[in-house]
Amino acid sequence: MIFVLVALTLLAIAISGVVSYALQRNATQARIDQELIRGVEEVRILAQEGVMPETGEPFVESEDLVYVAMQRHWPGQHESMLGLDAAGIAVYPHSSVPLRLEDDPQLVAALQQEASPGAFLEDVEIRTIATDITTYRAVLIPVHFAQDAEPSLLVFAIDYGETLRELDGIFLTYALTGLGVALVIALLGSIIIGRQLAPLRALQSTAAEISDADLERRVPVTSADDIAELSLTFNEMLDRIQAAFRSQRQLLDDVGHELRTPITIVQGNLELLNPRDPAEVEQVREISLDELERVNRLIEDLMTLAKAERPDFVSPAPLDLETFTSEVADKAARLGDREWSVAESARIVHDLDSQRITQAWLQLAGNAVKYSEPGSPISLGSRVVPGLEPTLELWVRDAGIGIAEGDRDRIFERFGRGGNATRAEGTGLGLNIVVEIVRAHGGSVGVDSEPGSGSTFTMSFPLGARGRAAPAATRGAT
């Protein structure tokens, strides 16, 4: 990148320099020509209005006019003059004039040819004359009077080559300055861009070193700019990927463990089966079907959890919670011989996926049946909890064996079971499915339990999360 920056800088300097040089060169030549034209105007005025200083009479001889014109003309920088006739140089400039045209024989020869009788100029001409010494921009002024037998040639000349050399020197300084500026830009740019790109290099290096076997590396964040924001976003992405990989590995390990047990049971029973004993065949058949049913439930639960990652896992729609609570209670009553009741119902309409919430609520009700005695009370209900952020709560309360404090977090994990649970009581995915359903609605799941006194599982939903809600009073029921 720094090379591109320097190249663009040099290109800009070069283009501006070339354009400026061309404009300055044209302007210099125009200025020189204007100075030469002013000299011509001075001679023309002197010829029309001037007189000989000694006599006061009008000019008669061309040499006299040339002499007086050269005396009165003060040459500019790098300018000089000569007066010539057919015999050669007739009038020289004052000795104080630095540029001595007479010292350039090639120039004198060229001018002498123009002053010769056979090739004498008819009108004023501005010419560029190049010699081995330099290049001149000169105006040739023919001077001739009717009574004068010998015309003269007055020449004003400017050292054009020296003027261009001065211009070249200025632009050489410009070029060197531009080169220095480009070097400074390269140095400062390499430092600044290097610092700016250092986080990107660290990002690239980290990305190159990350593999499915090592997801621990993170990009160091040492600033507060856009690249730092990119690094933070990249680190957050790595956190999510690492969590997904960890969850995937854990899931594969757990699934492998859960599937290995029924397969081992079925395989062991089949290997020891005596096909001639009808009673043993029937017993092995029942065991195998039971284990296969467990595998089927496990696969269905895993498919539900897999769908939980999809955006269409839930489809919320306005739901009347008072009616819905009653419907779920009727379905839950078929799960077991318990004393079922609806403690309270929220008189509210809220956006929920009725099928998924029914699945989660019945899962909690089913757990209550598993861990309670026949005929014991189980109540469920819905209520609105007021406050700065009001919530909707759906809950199930049982009078079962309860949950130890150390097990209350583990039971919501995949394949997590409490210490008082057995493998025969489920796949260990039910509560995790409840968590995913409630989380997809923007809510959370909690439990309040005392060993030996029962448990209360609560699904909480923020009323502002799904937009439309019309909270009202709750109504108790028995």
Image (tube, rainbow, N blue to C red):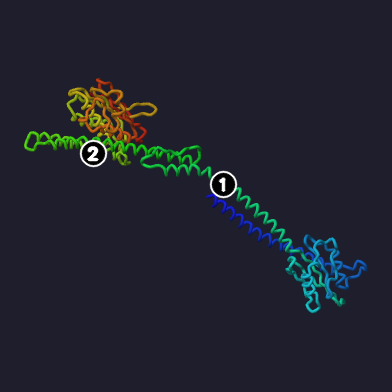
Relative to 73, is 247 on the left or the right? left
Which residue: 68% across, 62% down? 26
Q: Amino acid at mark 1?
A: Gly
Q: Is residue 124 above or below residue 6?
A: below
Residue 17, x across and y down, in percent:
64, 57
Q: Quadrant of residue 249?
A: top left
Q: Nearer the viewer, residue 162 or 33?
A: 162
Q: Nearer the viewer, residue 43 or 319?
A: 43
Say few, some or many: other residues with alpha carbon within 10 Å of mark 1 (under 14 / 14 to 19 / 20 or more): some
Which residue: 78% across, 72% down? 111
Q: Which residue is mark 2?
A: 299
Q: Is residue 48 visible?
A: no
The earlier-in-sequence mark between 2 and 1 is 1
Residue extending farthest to the right is 55
Say few, some or many: other residues with alpha carbon within 10 Å of mark 2 (under 14 / 14 to 19 / 20 or more): some
Q: Amino acid at mark 2?
A: Ile
Relative to 237, is 249 on the left or the right? left
Q: Label 2 vs label 1: CA separation?
A: 60 Å
Q: Quadrant of residue 162?
A: bottom right
Q: Is residue 159 visible?
A: yes
Q: Is residue 185 above or below residue 277?
A: below
Residue extending farthest to the front is 272
Q: Which residue is mark 1?
A: 189
Residue 52, x across and y down, in percent:
90, 68
Q: Quadrant of residue 363?
A: top left
Q: Nearer the viewer, residue 335 or 237?
A: 237
Q: Secondary structure at mark 1?
A: helix
Residue 429, x across and y down, in percent:
26, 33
Tell me the mark number nearer the camera, choosing from 2 and 1.
Answer: 1
